[in-house]
């Protein structure tokens, strides 16, 4: 191979590819953690190195030139190889120090993870923990996180998943709301019930109606994907919420609705990690520590 023919800087090529993926210099700069002028200089430097114009500015937009479009596939392969190299290198670390990134839902972050992180920090003070709080699944293959707690089994072959058990979900409300509701609620009439939902889909409605309820969209007048906001709206006596049993029973402001003998649903709990990172001592330590502590939670059923 003629190495002298490779006459460009990898960082400049990465700047070009991320700009294409993000759609703008400002978004790409944010994704890479650099300033927009720095990113602009890197893209311009690549154009100078390879003597090709990659973008044209049309109004406020950047548009790929024909030459730039032809190079995107090649730089994409380079970036994918860089991801894989980073994964393989990260998996070789045998030191109990450094950073581990964990992706968790809002409720896990607020109610389960703080005590786990505190205990982990006492035992492994040299491991730095970064927590991504999102109800959307982080892409572990793209290194958005090292470890994730999920309610579904991953389908990618490059991921390792450990099933920890099931969490029980029930309907909760405040005593005030439930007392008011009981006065207007007939045995066969659920028109007065308000459940604070996630979105406009019929998934929850259909699930409850399959259990014998008779609900429609009028029973879901408050919607938000934020579970923490759902909790606060519930505490304002605005409706019922779906909530994990361990969290709901521990909250003095909440009570179970309708004397539920059976839970509304059960959700699996999976701890997920990229297989390359399971060879990293610090990631394996955090993975096993979280698994052990979550399994000690008595409301998580095997």
Image: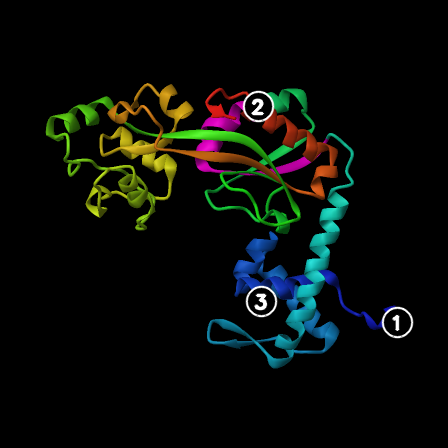
Viewer-nearest residue: 99 or 242: 242
Where disc 2 sits, the SS reads helix
Viewer-nearest residue: 214 or 123: 214
Can residue 249 be seen by looking at this rendering? yes
Task: Point out residue 269 in the picture as x, y percentages from the top left corner.
Answer: 51, 34
Lower sequence index among marks 3 and 1: 1
Magenta highlight range? 97-117
Where disc 3 sits, the SS reads helix
Q: Residue at x 61, y 65 (%)?
A: 40
Task: Point out residue 232 in the picture as x, y percentages from the top left corner.
Answer: 31, 32
Q: Residue at x 38, y 41 (%)?
A: 226
Viewer-nearest residue: 30 or 74: 74
**Looking at the image, residue 272 lies above or below residue 254:** below
Task: Point out residue 231 in the picture as x, y percentages from the top left corner.
Answer: 33, 32
Task: Point out residue 202 in the picture as x, y percentages from the top left corner.
Answer: 30, 49
Residue at the disc numbered 2: 293
Task: Indicate the quadrant where residue 215 lies.
Answer: top left
Residue at the disc numbered 3: 20
Residue at the disc numbered 1: 2
Residue at far bottom of view:
66
Q: Left or right: where does residue 257 sit relative to residue 187? A: right
């Amino acid at each position: 191979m003629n190495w002298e023919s490779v006459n460009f800087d990898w960082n400049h090529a990465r700047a070009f590819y991320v700009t294409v993926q993000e759609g703008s210099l400002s978004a790409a700069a944010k994704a890479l953690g650099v300033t927009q002028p720095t990113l602009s200089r890197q893209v311009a430097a690549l154009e100078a190195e390879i003597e090709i114009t990659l973008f044209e500015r049309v109004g406020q937009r950047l548009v790929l030139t024909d030459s730039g479009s032809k190079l995107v596939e090649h730089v994409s392969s380079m970036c994918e190889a860089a991801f894989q190299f980073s994964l393989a290198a990260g998996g070789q670390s045998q030191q109990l120090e450094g950073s581990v990134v964990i992706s968790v839902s809002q409720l896990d972050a607020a109610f389960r993870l703080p005590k786990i992180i505190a205990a982990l920090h006492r035992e492994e003070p040299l491991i730095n923990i970064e927590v991504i709080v999102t109800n959307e699944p982080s892409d572990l293959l793209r290194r958005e996180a090292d470890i994730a707690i999920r309610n579904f089994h991953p389908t990618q072959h490059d991921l390792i998943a450990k099933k920890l058990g099931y969490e029980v979900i029930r309907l909760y409300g405040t005593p005030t709301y439930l007392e008011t509701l009981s006065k207007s609620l007939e045995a066969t009439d659920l028109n007065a019930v308000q459940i604070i939902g996630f979105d406009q889909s019929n998934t929850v409605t259909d699930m409850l109606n399959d259990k014998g309820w008779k609900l429609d969209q009028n029973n879901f007048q408050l919607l938000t994907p934020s579970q923490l906001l759902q909790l606060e709206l519930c505490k304002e006596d605005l409706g019922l919420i779906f909530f994990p049993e361990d969290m709901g029973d521990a909250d003095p402001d909440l009570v179970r609705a309708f004397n539920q003998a059976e839970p509304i649903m059960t959700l699996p709990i999976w701890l997920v990690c990229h297989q390359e990172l399971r060879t990293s001592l610090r990631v394996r330590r955090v993975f096993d520590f979280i698994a052990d502590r979550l399994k000690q939670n008595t409301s998580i059923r095997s």
